[in-house]
């Protein structure tokens, strides 16, 4: 058997190698969360050796690969110690906010693979063990920081509010993601900003509502552009809503527009805004996405 090559997995030589590879991956456009896997590939190509991914048990690997398990573990450890939580990938398709007992809670929209059945119940479901058949997901358990004790105290009105918010955010999130248009990609970021500002412990209701207006404005403009029309450069959602009718989109969006409309000064306290008003604007911005899609805007649903 050929002896394993000696490749540094600690000390100054290893540190210099990893810094150089990581910098190159960054220049090539790889995000931090993607670099550990690609760094293993780069080390493999550089030294002509097989690199096992992550911290694997050498006894479970073929001998020719097991010899380099310490190197694979060292690469993984280097990234963990260098970037920590920035390596974590958020797999959510989106987030929204619900009010329960006067408190705001963030509600995650899951990334769906295969078939899944959503239910809403106060009782926490156990983690799925079998991969056979469709998955079962309790919407209540998608609420961030929700506990079984708190869930058990939710009222029927709470459950209905959660179900409504989840349904709107689910379809809107996937529509914004699935429809190829730069304005909708930007609108997704605005929705995320609206949620972050709402959930901030400091009073950022005005910032949140402005972000919801930006999301709605870009959504309306995308609907106009995808329909072959042109839009004015305005923050007036009513003008934009009137324009979508000219490209064949049907529906009455006036109530949604009224809940969202605000002036740029709202970000600086020049226009009053309560958390309740910001929350209503956020929900309306998601409902507007769905209303436009249902009104025959050239949006992709993103869900079967």
Image (cartoon, rainbow, N blue to C red):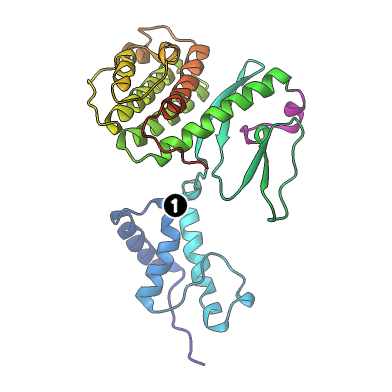
Residue nearest the observer in this picture, 181 or 19: 181
Residue 160 position, x and y percent, is 66, 22
Q: In which quarter of the image is residue 265?
A: top left
- Up-down relation of residue 74 to residue 123 (above or below): below
Residues in magenta?
Answer: 142-153
- Up-down relation of residue 104 to residue 273 (above or below): below
In the picture provided, is 279 more to the left or to the right than 217? right
Residue nearest the observer in this picture, 247 or 124: 247
In the picture provided, is 166 more to the left or to the right than 25? right
Q: In which quarter of the image is residue 180?
A: top left
In the picture provided, is 174 more to the left or to the right than 23? right
Whether residue 144 is in magenta: the answer is: yes
Whether residue 285 is in magenta: the answer is: no
The residue identified by callout 1 is 33
Residue at point 38%, 10% (across, down): 269
Residue at point 52%, 45% (across, down): 91
Q: Can residue 196 be seen in this view?
A: yes
């Amino acid at each position: 058997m050929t002896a394993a090559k000696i490749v540094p997995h600690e000390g100054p030589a290893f540190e210099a190698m990893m810094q150089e590879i990581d910098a190159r991956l960054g220049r090539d456009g790889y995000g931090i969360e993607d670099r550990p896997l690609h760094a293993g590939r780069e080390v493999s190509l550089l030294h002509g050796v097989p690199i096992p991914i992550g911290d694997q048990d050498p006894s479970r690997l073929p001998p020719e690969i097991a010899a380099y398990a310490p190197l694979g573990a060292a690469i993984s450890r280097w990234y963990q110690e260098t970037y920590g939580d920035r390596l974590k990938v958020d797999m959510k398709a989106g987030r929204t906010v619900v009010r329960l007992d006067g408190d705001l809670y963030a509600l995650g929209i899951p990334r769906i693979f295969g078939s899944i059945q959503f239910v809403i119940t106060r009782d926490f479901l156990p983690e799925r063990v079998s991969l056979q058949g469709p998955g079962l997901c309790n919407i209540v358990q998608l609420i961030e920081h929700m506990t079984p004790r708190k869930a058990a105290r939710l009222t029927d009105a709470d459950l209905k509010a959660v179900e409504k918010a989840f349904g709107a955010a689910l379809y809107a999130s996937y529509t914004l993601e699935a429809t190829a248009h730069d304005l909708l990609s930007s609108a997704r970021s605005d929705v995320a900003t609206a949620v972050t500002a709402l959930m901030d412990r400091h009073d950022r209701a005005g910032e949140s509502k402005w972000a919801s207006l930006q999301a709605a404005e870009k959504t309306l403009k995308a609907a106009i552009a995808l329909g072959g029309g042109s839009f004015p450069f305005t923050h007036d959602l009513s003008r934009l809503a009137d324009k979508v009718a000219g490209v064949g989109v049907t529906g009455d969006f006036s109530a949604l527009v009224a809940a969202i409309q605000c002036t740029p000064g709202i970000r600086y306290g020049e226009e009053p805004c309560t958390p309740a008003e910001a929350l209503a604007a956020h929900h309306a911005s998601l409902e507007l996405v769905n209303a436009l899609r249902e009104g025959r805007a050239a949006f992709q649903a993103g869900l079967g």
